Amino acid sequence: MDASSSGQGAATGGRWGALGPVGLVLAGGVSVQFGGAIAVSVMPKAGALGIVTLRLAFAALVLMIVCRPKVRGHSRADWGTVVAFGVAMAGMNGLFYQSVARIPMGPAVTLEVLGPLALSVFASRRAMNLVWAGLALCGVFLLGGGGGFSGLDPVGVAYALGAGAMWATYIMFSARTGRRFPQADGLALAMVVAAVLFLPLGLLESGEKLVRPEVLALGAAVAVMSSVLPYTLELLALRRLPASTFAIMMSLEPAIAAVAGFLVLNQALSVNEALAISLVIAASMGAVRTQVGRGRARKSGDVVVTGATPDAVLAQGVEGTEGTEGTEGTDSAEEPVAETSGK
């Protein structure tokens, strides 16, 4: 009876062990996108630049308190990397929030995902990825109502594409920062850089609106939901979840964004937009699986470095595709994957 109970407990533990990290990743994605939806609802009170300023400032404050990173003992190259990471973070957030101020969240996140997807396709250099790129382009064609983006604000589309380019840059510098700084120290310092860069823009656009109690409270909520909470959940998930599986799940973010936009902002999708989002998600998942197949051909298994940020884990191998394998600091043979929510 004891053995049977023990076996049943082990089986139950195994099932929960498999479901646990998956649930954490999904919870992180829901937190990011619903936090973004709340941010859009706050924009009439604080403006797009104002809400980005509050999100970055509160997130930087929390991360600095929790991580308490060391500011001494780093080289000029280390600081250059973390500053570049912060610039990419600021640009990604600023452009994305300008986008969702003009177009629905589902299409905005779908267009933004094209940046990391392009990074994934170009870095892997496999013919199969041309199929995934073509599938993504079909999705973009549908999203634009036949190629002209007649149903979407072209400025919002441009902002979303720009955010995607900055997201790809963010992923690459996240990997480099993760190798130069322990734990999440580099992320905390980069968040401070991003917050300092955005502070003048937020003050210029919103002024005294930023210090109104209700705006401060909502800004803090957005920071927790869109940065602090999902980052924490993803780190916990990556302790037990292969990086490749994590990346595939992150490919679902456009769909989560569409649901958040519908429930919070009453943004309904047309049939074409829903199909377009599905095509881009499929392309992203396909690109990730292609990379994983290549990585496993060279090295068995997924390597997750303890303490590495989600983006650093997912960007393993970016530099390796440009040079020789086995370069110091490259922890995995896998190529960079499609995207992550750690922005």
Image: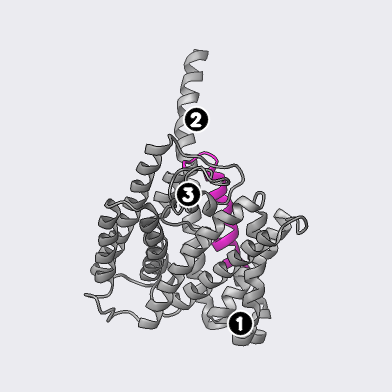
Q: Secondary structure at mark 2?
A: helix
Q: Which residue extends farthest right?
A: 72
Q: Report the Cα–Cα distance between label 2 and label 1.
A: 50 Å
Q: Which x, y percent locates residue 243?
A: 47, 45
Task: Check disc 2 and give the amino acid type.
Answer: Gly
Q: Nearer the viewer, residue 328 or 245?
A: 328
Instruction: Report which residue position mark 2 lands on.
Output: 13
Q: Secondary structure at mark 1?
A: helix
Q: Answer with mark 3 or mark 2, whichever residue precedes in sequence.
A: 2
Task: Check disc 3 and give the amino acid type.
Answer: Gly
Residue drawn 45% across the image and 51% down it: 26
Residue 201, numbered circle: 1
Q: Is residue 270 visible?
A: no
Instruction: Report which residue position mark 3 lands on.
Output: 317
Q: Which x, y percent locates residue 64?
A: 71, 60
Counting other residues with Cα less than 10 Å from the Cα at mark 1, is it few (<14), some (14-19), or many (20 or more)?
A: some
Q: Answer with mark 1 or mark 3, whichever residue precedes in sequence.
A: 1
Our reading of the magenta stretch's main secondary structure is helix
Q: Which x, y percent locates residue 221?
A: 60, 66
Residue drawn 71% across the image and 58% down it: 75
Residue drawn 29% across the image and 80% down it: 151
Q: Report the Cα–Cα distance between label 1 and label 3.
A: 35 Å
Question: Does 274 lie within the magenta span?
Answer: no
